[in-house]
Image (cartoon, rainbow, N blue to C red):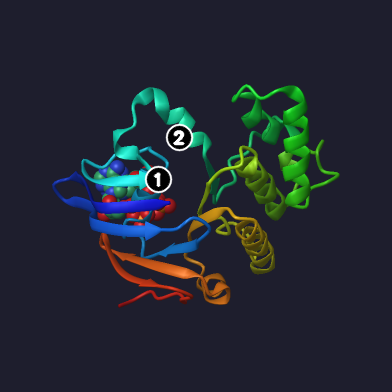
Amino acid sequence: MITFNNVTVQYDASHTALRGVNIHIDKGEFVFIVGASGAGKSTFVKILTHELVPKEGSVIVNGQDITRLSNSKVPYYRRKLGIVFQDFRLLEDKTVYENVAFVLRVTGAKSREIRERTSHVLNLVGLRGKENEMPSKLSGGEQQRVAIARALANQPLLLIADEPTGNLDPNTSQEIMDLFSAINHMGTTIIMVTHNQDLVNAMHKRVILIDEGHIVSDVEKGGYISHV
Ligand code: ADP
Ligand code: ADP
C-alpha cells in the first residue's frame, strides 16, 4: 500500500532529514514510527501528506507515485488520508457535530450522507450525545476523539497520527490507543509517530526506528527502542 524507494530529503547543506529510505507498509498494518527529536519522523509524515515532495526517490501510495502528483490531484489524494495531531486542531467555534460534518461538506457529499456518516463516526469513537457540545467544554481525550472521528469521516485508506497522545494523561492515552486498535481491526492502515514508550511496548505492533534520517531498525511486534 505504501512504498518508499530510496527517498532522500535534504532541506539545505547542513540538514539532511532522510537518507536513502526504503520502506514497505501493507494495507491493514499498524506501524509505529519512533526516533529521537530531529531523526526525520516529521519529514516522513510530511511526505505522506504531500506537504513535502522529495527530490530524490519515489513514494507509492495505493499504486500512485505521489512525488509526481499534479497540483489538481493533491486535494483528492489528501481526502484518502485521515490525519490526527497532538494538539487536536479542532475548529473552536464549531460544535462537535460540525467539526466532523464540515470535512464531508467540502467534498460535496449529499446532506443525508453527511448526517449518516457524521453520526456513524461519532458513535464509533464513543461520542454519542456530545454532538452539540463545543470543543472547549470537552476533556482532552474527548477532543482527540472528535479529531479521530473527523479523520475517519471520509473513510480513509490510511490514518496518520502524529503524537496523538502527547497532550493526554496515561489512562486517557491508553483509551485512545484502544480506539486506534479497534479502527485498525476494522481494516484501516495506521501509521503513528510517538515518543510514548509504554504504549508502544504494550501494543506489540511493527516498530520502525529512524535515526539521523536512516531506518536503523524495523521489527514486527516490536517494542520501543531509543538507542541502537
Ligand atoms: P523529527 O520529526 O524526528 O523531530 P524532522 O523530520 O522534523 O525530525 O527533522 C529532521 C532533520 O531535518 C532535523 O535535523 C531538522 O532540523 C531538519 N529540518 C526539518 N525541517 C526543516 C526545514 N524546514 N528546514 C531545514 N531543516 C529542517
Ligand atoms: P516536531 O519535533 O514536533 O516535529 P519541530 O520543533 O522539530 O517539531 O519542528 C517544527 C517545525 O519546524 C516543523 O515544521 C519542521 O519542519 C520545522 N523545522 C524543524 N527543524 C528546522 C530547521 N532546522 N530549520 C527550519 N525549520 C525547521
Residue at 64 percent across and 68 percent down: it is 170
Label 2 crowding class (10 Å Cα cut-off): few <14, some 14-19, many 20+?
Answer: some
Q: Mark 2 vs ligand 2: CB under 8 Å?
A: no
Q: How many marks?
A: 2
> How far across and down, in percent of the image, does residue 36 sit?
36, 65
Q: In the displayed structure, does residue 196 sit left or right of residue 116?
A: left
> How far across and down, in percent of the image, does residue 22 sit?
28, 58
Q: Amino acid at mark 1?
A: Val
> How far across and down, in percent of the image, does residue 216 sit?
29, 70
Residue 82, above or below 181: above
Residue 96 visible, this orientation: no
Residues at marks 2 and 1, CA–CA distance in whole angstroms: 9 Å
Nearest to the observer: residue 117 or residue 197 = 117
Residue 40, above or below 196: above
Residue at 38 percent across and 43 percent down: it is 63
Residue 113 visible, this orientation: yes
Label 1 crowding class (10 Å Cα cut-off): few <14, some 14-19, many 20+?
Answer: some
Residue at 51 percent across and 68 percent down: it is 196
Q: Secondary structure at mark 2?
A: helix
Nearest to the observer: residue 132 or residue 111 = 111
Please name the residue that numbered disc 1 is placed on.
Answer: 61
Q: Residue furthest left?
A: 13
Residue 171, above or below 115: below
Please name the residue that numbered disc 2 is placed on.
Answer: 77
Q: Dots 2 and 1: beta carbons under 8 Å?
A: yes
Q: Amino acid at mark 2?
A: Tyr
Q: In the displayed structure, does residue 190 sit left or right of residue 210?
A: right
* Dot 2 or dot 1, earlier in sequence: 1
Q: Which mark is residue 4?
A: none
Q: In the displayed structure, does residue 192 sit left or right of residue 51?
A: right
> How far across and down, in percent of the image, does residue 221 sit?
48, 75
Q: Mark 1 vs ligand 1: CB under 8 Å?
A: no
